[in-house]
Amino acid sequence: MAVIKFNEAEVKLLARLIRAEAESEGVQGMLLVGNVGVNRVRANCLDFTNIRTIEQMVFQRPGGFEATLFGYFYQAAREKEIALARRVINGERFEPASRALWFYNAFDEDCRAQWWGQWNTGRFKAHCFYAPLESENCY
C-alpha cells in the first residue's frame, strides 16, 4: 500500500530522479535516494512543510535535487527504475535512509557528522545520509 499519494507521471518522475542521482550506486543506492524523496513528501517539518507531492519534492527550490539541473534527468524513465520507485512509494525502507531527508555525494571524503544541522545516519558507497532528530516531529 502506498505511503504517499501519486499518479503514474509522478512514479516516472521519481524513477528519473533516482536514476539521475544514484545510478552509479546501483539498485540499493537508487532505493536509498528514493527513500529520501518519499520521506520529503511525508515529512511535515523543516524545509518540507509545503511539500505534499512527488512533483513538488523533485522540483523544490531552494533545497531541491541537483540532478534536475542537468539533461540526464530529463531522459525517459526506464522500467527498472520505475519498479524501484514503486517499491519506495509502497513503503519499503532501507538503512541508512529510512528516515533521511538529505544526502550528498562525499566522493572519497568522510561523511560530515552533521550537515545542515542534521545528524549523519550512515553512508552507502559515496552518499552520506542525514535525518532529522526525533524531536523535530517530522513524521
Image: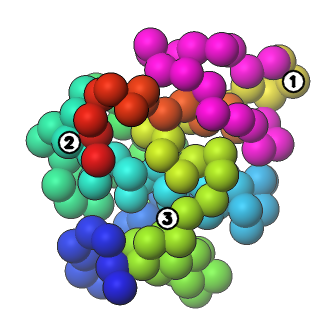
Tell me the kind of residue under disc 3. Answer: Arg
Point out residue 128 in the picture as x, y percentages from the top left corner: 67, 32
Q: Residue tagged by mark 2?
A: 44
Which secondary structure, mark 1? Answer: loop
Q: Find the distance from the CA under tag 3 to the CA under tag 2.
A: 24 Å
Mark closer to the chain start, 3 or 1: 3
Q: Is residue 14 above or below residue 116?
A: below
Nearer to us: label 3 or label 1: 1
Q: Categorize mark 2 by other alpha carbons within 10 Å: few (<14), some (14-19), many (20+).
A: some
Image point (52%, 78%), residue name: 87
Mark closer to the chain start, 3 or 2: 3
Q: Is residue 57 left or right of residue 116?
A: left
Which secondary structure, mark 2? Answer: loop
Q: Residue tagged by mark 3?
A: 16
Q: Residue tagged by mark 1?
A: 108
Nearer to us: label 2 or label 1: 2
Residue 90 or residue 66, whichever sits in front? 90
Q: Find the distance from the CA under tag 2 to the CA under tag 1.
A: 33 Å
Image point (28%, 39%), residue name: 138
